[in-house]
Image (cartoon, rainbow, N blue to C red):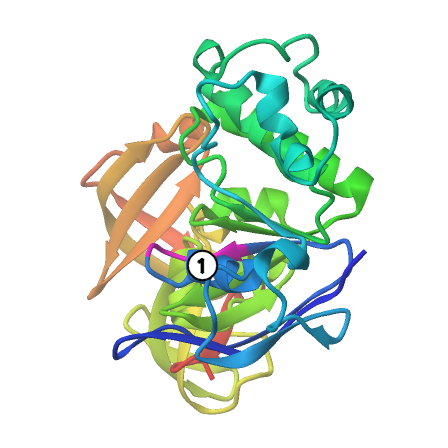
Amino acid sequence: MTALGLHGLSKDLGNLAVVDDLTLEVEPGELLALLGPSGAGKTTTLQLIAGLLRPTKGDIRFDGRSILDQPPERRRAVLMLQTPSLFPYMSTADNAGFGLLMQGWGRQRARDRAEGMLTEVGLPGLGDRRPAQLSGGQQQRVALARALLAEPRVLLLDEPLANLDPELRQEMRGLIGTVQRERAITTIFVTHDQEEAVEMGDRIALVFDGRLEQVGSPPDFYERPRSPRTAHFFGSQVFPGTRHGDTVATSLGNLCVTQEQPGDGPVAVTIRPEEVVLGHGGPENTVEGRIIESHYRGRHVTLRVAVADAVVEASLHPDQARSLPIGGITKMTLPADRLWVMAADGT
């Protein structure tokens, strides 16, 4: 297992810092989800680790030793892309074992090894097929087999499931997670999908505009976001306000909070839609508003409720929502122990 360290890593393209002073430690055998919107610098970060790009400044270390002077083929940082990039004229087994052939393995030996790996990723007996005879999910399994056959010290996955339909995505998530855990390969999994990051990652590193915004366990991002931007990205609602002791003055009114930090002054209060209690008042933090939107989402319904100059979102069971029509007036409680308070600027 390999420890991966990024230290002040930056990459400038012209006057734009695509990756900006990124410092991050990935533990040996850990699967880190590198999450962020398009243009956040996620792919560039993987290319820097793989040696396809050279950083403007900073360092990349495997087990504490810099690898900047090592060419890509010596780093054993294997990059698996969004598209499988299989050779159309080669068999599945030859595609999977291509790296072994390039290392000088004999054709039959490489094929035997590739066939074994294809079985491991769920493609037994398909070694003679051409890529055109495989589904998209099967092609990604071949690409995964090829990456694993390279025996990577660090596995870099650049949104490998983005082009698959939801059922195949779920299936591949399970496969990648199982293989990664069994082999204890230090892995960075790039995605822009919060649900995917939460399901896949031991930890999540969230990046915006090339800079690291927050790193932590999946629950941290839902329950303890570091900034309003992080809270919004993970689907929480944010209300600016001013704190005085145990009360925050917001556009919803004065809200009681139980969290001790941060101190008095400008803050932002966040709560998840599923934590809002509708239909009845509570002992504290009860507001009243008019329902302006209702969105059925299968297992739950999302209501948008206008309260003074703000809008509160609440998620509830469809049975409960039937008695709450658009235009109706409802009371809501924002439980004090479910409110998370952060500095207004995220510091």
Q: Is residue 35 magenta?
A: yes
Report crowding for label 1: few under 14, some 14 to 19, many 20 or more residues within 10 A (C-alpha): many
Q: Position of residue 335 (x, y in %)?
A: 52, 61
Direction from residue 187 to residue 306 in the image, left or right: left
Highlighted magenta segment, given as a residue range: 34-38
**Which residue: 63% across, 50% down?**
201
Quadrant of the image containing the N terminus: bottom right
Which image quadrant for residue 250? Answer: bottom left
Please, what is the three-letter code of the amino acid marked with disc 1? Lys
Q: Nearer the viewer, residue 244 or 99?
A: 99
**Dot 1 lies on which element?**
helix
Q: Position of residue 89 (x, y in %)?
A: 46, 18
Direction from residue 202 to residue 235 in the image, left or right: left
Q: Position of residue 234 (x, y in %)?
A: 44, 55
- Placement of 101 over or under 60, stated as above or below: above
- Placement of 215 over or under 279, stated as above or below: below
* Image label count: 1
Q: Is residue 288 magenta?
A: no
- Placement of 205 over or under 124, stated as above or below: below
- Placement of 279 over or under 211, stated as above or below: above
**Which residue: 77% across, 19% down?**
112
Q: Is residue 23 visible?
A: yes
Q: Position of residue 257 (x, y in %)?
A: 52, 74
Q: Is residue 174 visible?
A: no
Residue of label 1: 42
Q: Nearer the viewer, residue 256 or 200?
A: 200
Q: Nearer the viewer, residue 126 or 157?
A: 126
Q: What secondary structure characterizes most of the magenta part? A: loop
